[in-house]
Amino acid sequence: MNASHVPRRPACAPLLASLALTALAAGCASGPYKTALQVQSTKQLNLTFDEKPSSVNIRVFQLIDQGPFLDTGRTTAELFSDDPGLPAQTWVQPVVDADVYIDSTADIEIEIKPKVRFLGIVAVFNEQDGESRVLLPVDDIDDKKLFFDRYSLSVRDRDDDGATEGADDGAASEEAR
């Protein structure tokens, strides 16, 4: 082989390698991104002592780890306090506080932060007959909704028509803490 005939690398090879690495890193990023959490309620939402429906306050946590949120040792009141008692490495601030109104369907806008894998939702009901907290994987937000009936909160498919007719879009208010 002739020493003067050594193949040369194209001058743009380092640039192409750098662009490929940048594209690969960007594809692995997990956030932040905005999404809408759909909530739906019935006419019998959160009945008072005189059987009148009332709105429900909810708090949405962005969770890296689901375990501590589901710990039954934490009360709803503790999760609604300024210090919810969750280990710092398991959740990301801010939380989103919102109201779910009677016989309504609404979207709550949330900016999902990097590393977040779950939304932990806790609700304050007048009675504790039903489930007051649920866990929703962030990969399911576009396909699922939160469903509120009487004193209970559940996760359902978005196309599940189990709530009320004539729901009012935009019926949730939100406040980031």
Image: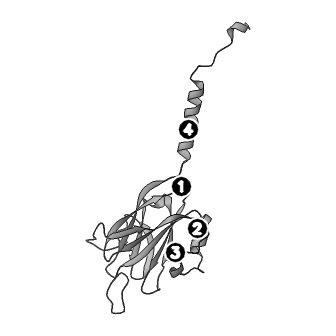
- Give yes or no for contact between labels 2 and 3 (Cβ–Cβ under 8 Å): no
Question: Mark 3 or mark 4: which is in front?
Answer: 3
Provide residue 166's location: percent of width, then percent of height.
25, 71
Q: Secondary structure at mark 4?
A: helix
Q: Would you place residue 44 above or below residue 107 in this image? A: below
Question: Mark 2 or mark 3: which is in front?
Answer: 3
Label 4 or label 2, whichever comes before in sequence order: 4
Label 3 or label 4, whichever comes before in sequence order: 4
Q: Which residue is mark 4?
A: 22
Q: Which mark is residue 66?
A: 2
At 39% from the left and 76% from the top, the residue drawn is 148
Q: Which mark is residue 122?
A: none
Label 1 or label 3, whichever comes before in sequence order: 3
Label 1 or label 4, whichever comes before in sequence order: 4
Instruction: Find the residue positioned furthest to the left.
Output: 166
Provide residue 108's location: percent of width, then percent of height.
38, 65
At 33% from the left and 90% from the top, the residue drawn is 51
Label 2 or label 3, whichever comes before in sequence order: 2
- Give yes or no for contact between labels 4 and 2 (Cβ–Cβ under 8 Å): no
- Front position in the image: 99 or 83: 83
Q: Which mark is residue 114?
A: 1
**Tag 2: amino acid:** Gln
Q: Which mark is residue 82?
A: 3
Question: Mark 2, residues whose alpha carbon is within 10 Å: few (<14), some, or many (≥20)?
Answer: some
Question: Mark 1, residues whose alpha carbon is within 10 Å: few (<14), some, or many (≥20)?
Answer: some
**Tag 4: amino acid:** Thr
Q: Secondary structure at mark 3?
A: loop
